[in-house]
Image: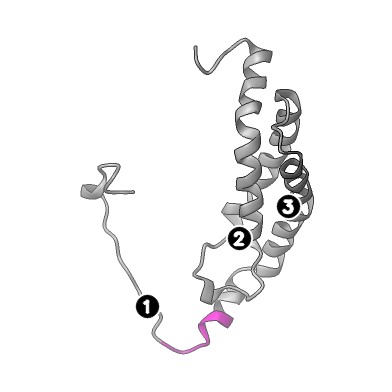
Amino acid sequence: MVARLGLSDYVHLFAAAYAAFSDLPGTVGSWWDFQAIQSQYARFTDTYAPVAARLAQARAQPGPDEAFRRYVPLLTQWRRLPYLDPGLPTELLPADWNAVRARQVFQQLHGVLLEPSLRHVGEVTGLRADA
């Protein structure tokens, strides 16, 4: 992405490897509260997976106002999660790490709800994306 954005002249990239003195996965687990992060991912998934399943079963896109009503709380709850997630390699995360499932639910709903939500905003404000 750095090269694609033409920023490679301004970036220095380093790579490092853990050398010694502790069990790295165990040590990393003391740096982040994985249980608290997983609890938040679980709440998100428990709240929104049923919504995603209902919308997938309906096979019809929700109307603009309904999509907006669902999208705003979805986005509000989701947007803090990536900042809490340390983004570590799988081998350093708990075996039952549930962020992937939560991300799938978010992406599914985002894909269904974004466009009609934007239409709703355009209808309410009089501002159109195509204007």
Q: Is residue 87 left or right of residue 67?
A: left
The dot on residue 33 is none
The dot on residue 44 is 3
Q: How is the image coloured?
A: one colour
Q: Nearer the viewer, mark 2 or mark 1?
A: 2
Q: In the rendered structure, are the residues bearing label 3 and label 1 in contact, judged by CB atoms less than 8 Å apart?
A: no
Q: Secondary structure at mark 3?
A: helix
Residue 51 versus residue 15 in the image, above or below: above
Residue 127 versus residue 78 in the image, above or below: above
From which residue to which does the magenta span run?
20-26
Q: Nearer the viewer, residue 54 or 71?
A: 54
Q: Earlier in the sequence, mark 2 or mark 3?
A: 3
Q: Which residue is mark 1?
A: 17
The dot on residue 100 is 2
**Residue found at the far bottom of this picture:** 21
Q: Nearer the viewer, mark 3 or mark 1?
A: 3
Q: Earlier in the sequence, mark 2 or mark 1?
A: 1
Q: Amino acid at mark 2?
A: Val
Q: Is residue 89 magenta?
A: no
- Where residue 28 appears, as percent x and y from the top left, is 55, 75
Q: Earlier in the sequence, mark 3 or mark 1?
A: 1
Label 2 vs label 3: CA separation? 12 Å
Q: Is residue 34 left or right of residue 92?
A: right
Q: Is residue 13 left or right of residue 109?
A: left
Residue 84 versus residue 78 in the image, above or below: below
Q: Amino acid at mark 1?
A: Ala
- Where residue 9 appears, as percent x and y from the top left, is 20, 48
Q: Quadrant of residue 71?
A: top right
